[in-house]
């Protein structure tokens, strides 16, 4: 089923998702650290390059839009769209015959934001304020949702599963391991931090989601310390050291300038551009980087990779990366896409010729995609671009261990969890026997060290024991499930979800998939009484339950209807409906009391 948390944070295409319900929340045996609690969400600046002065807000569906202006203040409610305008350091709100002012507003329900011909619907908390007549919009996202969005936005068509996993780990590390210089949010949505598209138009969301889920909670570590991580589009055949790009950066052994044969394996990316003196002068003036009237540009210093570190405008020296960013923001990023360039002057025209795209520090996306194309995995990709560093759990610094058995792989931070392998094998065999179905590919089981880690990694609520999507199962700590005698039933339940989702066709209703799992997970359990929930509304209730009670009622109803289907038409017909969908006459029969 879709829990309330996943309804809010995961893409709509994720239908093969379920959670195993508990009668009460599991209390983690491992105390949640302050760091873990603080890293559950991250605040992201929205539309930061637009500097919008006005946006429109509209509640989802037919609901009223409720805005709060301060802690403890009564909600401001609007029955229609609301225009939010920046007025100096204050906000003006106009809509539905109402008008008011506020210093800051927050929205905690589904809302559609409209500005500069763009519409985005969010299900995450949004805070809006103003500064110098421009709106500041900050969206609070779960960490893993943020990573998924950035991976989808920053990745390219050449990426595949392993290069995307490596990128997800780097994106997560960059977000969590250093400050980014913003006052109103942790990161912006532009390339100043990491690019994040708020829409879902590029078709890479599914792959990004799978890569994020497969690496959930993992960041880069070096010798027991969290490591800084960066990436760029194309290093041009040699990566840069941080000091070549950022003047105050310290040398780091895991971020050297080194040759990258993978980046140039297919073809080198060279570029050339022509920019007039007037355009250069205007771009630099917006950043106060050059005095008026300058005449000549020369490269005064290069780094180990060959990139320009500093430039000289007549007798004034400026940082080459700052120069590149100033040109990119004013004239477009393709004008000077990297600092690895030569410059020639002819009259009032400047001719730049170079290679690479981006700063070149850390992971090269082009090279990583080439490595993945040569069947190298995310571990090998990270070792290439961050020598000596490795992916580990963000909170504990421990590395994930894998135990492979027939039909599944157990991933855990605690080697003692190997003791539960026989239980997992038994549950898998029971699920196959009860359903009569067989898995075509191995299942990955990742057991989290705490309830908080499970919740943060999967966005599932704390009152569920496990979460399944496709052939990936995430669980709360196995030792906790075992101590409460829930391990066998939980894993049998999740294996059944894997089997049924693999077998189900695209038109199989959610209630049937969930109902069969409930029925076969505990075949000797009493069939629920006829529910008050109509079968036509059941899929929506399963997908959008807001509380444990709502979810439990919906699952009981699904079990009831699935049992009626089998009793009336038989097991083989039920499997046929699972594969091909339910005929209308079958649905009509099931609705009869």
Image: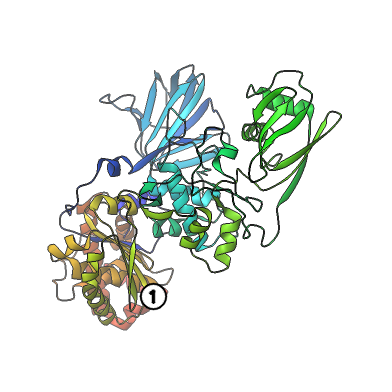
Residue 82 is drawn in which quadrant?
top left
Q: Secondary structure at mark 1?
A: helix
Q: Position of residue 81 (x, y in %)?
A: 45, 32
Image point (52%, 19%), residue name? 133
Q: Is residue 439 above or below residue 158?
A: below
x, y percentage for residue 37? 28, 42
Q: Is residue 233 visible?
A: yes
Q: Nearer the viewer, residue 501 or 234?
A: 234
Q: Is residue 413 or residue 19 the one in the foreground?
A: 413
Q: Is residue 353 left or right of residue 266?
A: right
Q: Quadrant of the image for the N terminus? A: bottom left
Mark 1: few/some/many CA within 10 Å (<14, 14-19, 20+): some
State the quadrant of the C terminus.
Answer: bottom left
Q: Position of residue 401 (x, y in %)?
A: 33, 64
Question: Residue drawn 38% across and 74% down?
Answer: 442
Residue 81 visible in the picture: no
Q: Quadrant of residue 158?
A: bottom right
How many callouts does the rendering have?
1
Judge from the rendering whether residue 77 lies leftward or rightward of residue 414; answer left or right: right
Picture quadrant of residue 94: top left
Tell me what residue is drawn at x 21 percent, y 58 percent.
Answer: 552
* Residue 572 vs residue 199, the one in the foreground: 199
**Residue at the spot of label 1:** 503
Extreme right residue here? Answer: 347
Please name the colour scheme applied to the rendered image.
rainbow
Percent position of residue 46, x then y: 48, 36
From the viewer's perspective, tell me whether residue 546 is left or right of residue 148: left
Q: Is residue 521 left or right of residue 80?
A: left
Q: Nearer the viewer, residue 342 or 252?
A: 252
Q: Give me the residue at 24% from left, 44% from top.
A: 33
């Amino acid at each position: 089923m879709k829990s309330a948390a996943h309804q809010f944070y995961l893409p709509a295409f994720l239908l093969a998702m379920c959670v195993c319900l508990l009668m009460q929340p599991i209390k983690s045996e491992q105390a949640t650290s302050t760091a873990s609690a603080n890293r559950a969400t991250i605040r992201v600046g929205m539309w930061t390059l637009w500097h919008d002065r006005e946006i429109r807000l509209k509640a989802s569906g037919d609901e009223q839009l409720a805005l709060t202006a301060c802690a403890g203040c009564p909600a401001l409610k609007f029955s229609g769209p609301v225009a939010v305008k920046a007025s100096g350091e204050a906000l003006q709100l106009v809509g539905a015959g109402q008008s008011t002012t506020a210093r800051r507003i927050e929205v905690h329900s589904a809302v559609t934001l409209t500005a500069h011909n763009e519409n985005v619907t969010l299900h995450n908390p949004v805070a809006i304020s103003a500064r110098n007549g421009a709106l500041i919009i900050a969206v609070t996202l779960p960490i893993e949702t943020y990573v998924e969005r950035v991976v989808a936005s920053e990745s390219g068509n050449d990426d595949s599963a392993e290069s995307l996993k490596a990128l997800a780990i780097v994106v997560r590390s960059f977000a969590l391991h250093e400050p980014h210089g913003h006052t109103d949010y942790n990161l912006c949505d532009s390339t100043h931090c990491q690019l994040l598209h708020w829409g879902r138009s590029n078709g890479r969301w599914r792959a990004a989601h799978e890569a994020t889920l497969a690496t959930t909670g993992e960041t880069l570590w070096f010798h027991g310390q969290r490591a800084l991580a960066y990436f760029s589009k194309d290093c041009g055949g040699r990566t840069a050291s941080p000091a070549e790009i950022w003047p105050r950066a310290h040398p780091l052994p895991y971020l050297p300038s080194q040759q990258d044969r993978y980046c140039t394996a297919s073809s080198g990316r060279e570029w050339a551009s022509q920019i007039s003196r007037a355009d250069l002068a205007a771009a630099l003036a917006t950043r106060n980087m050059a005095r008026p009237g300058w005449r000549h540009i020369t490269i005064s210093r290069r780094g180990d990779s060959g990139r320009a570190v500093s430039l000289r405008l007549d007798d004034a020296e400026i940082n080459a990366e700052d120069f590149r960013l100033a040109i990119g923001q004013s004239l477009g990023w393709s004008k000077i896409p990297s600092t690895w360039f030569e410059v020639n002057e002819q009259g009032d025209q400047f001719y730049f010729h170079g290679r690479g795209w981006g700063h070149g520090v850390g992971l090269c996306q082009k090279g990583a995609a080439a490595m993945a194309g040569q069947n190298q995995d995310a571990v090998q990709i990270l070792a290439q671009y961050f020598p000596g560093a490795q992916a580990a759990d963000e909170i504990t610094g421990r590395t994930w261990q894998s135990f492979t058995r027939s039909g599944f792989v157990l991933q855990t931070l605690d080697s003692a969890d190997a003791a539960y392998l026989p239980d997992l094998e038994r549950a898998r065999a029971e699920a196959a026997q009860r359903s009569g179905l067989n898995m075509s590919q191995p299942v990955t089981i990742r057991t989290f060290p705490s309830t908080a880690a499970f919740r943060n990694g999967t966005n599932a609520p704390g009152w569920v024991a496990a979460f399944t999507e496709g052939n990936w199962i995430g669980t709360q700590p196995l030792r906790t499930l075992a101590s409460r005698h829930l391990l066998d039933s939980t894993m049998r339940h999740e294996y059944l979800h894997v089997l049924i989702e693999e077998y189900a066709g695209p038109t199989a209703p959610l209630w049937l998939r969930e109902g069969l799992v409930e029925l076969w997970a505990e075949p000797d359990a009493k069939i629920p009484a006829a529910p008050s929930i109509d079968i036509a509304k059941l899929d929506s209730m399963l997908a959008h339950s807001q509380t444990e009670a709502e979810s439990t009622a919906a699952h009981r109803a699904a079990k009831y209807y699935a049992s009626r289907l089998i009793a009336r038409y038989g097991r083989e017909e039920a499997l046929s409906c699972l594969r091909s969908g339910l005929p209308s006459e079958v649905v009509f029969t099931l609705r009869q009391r």
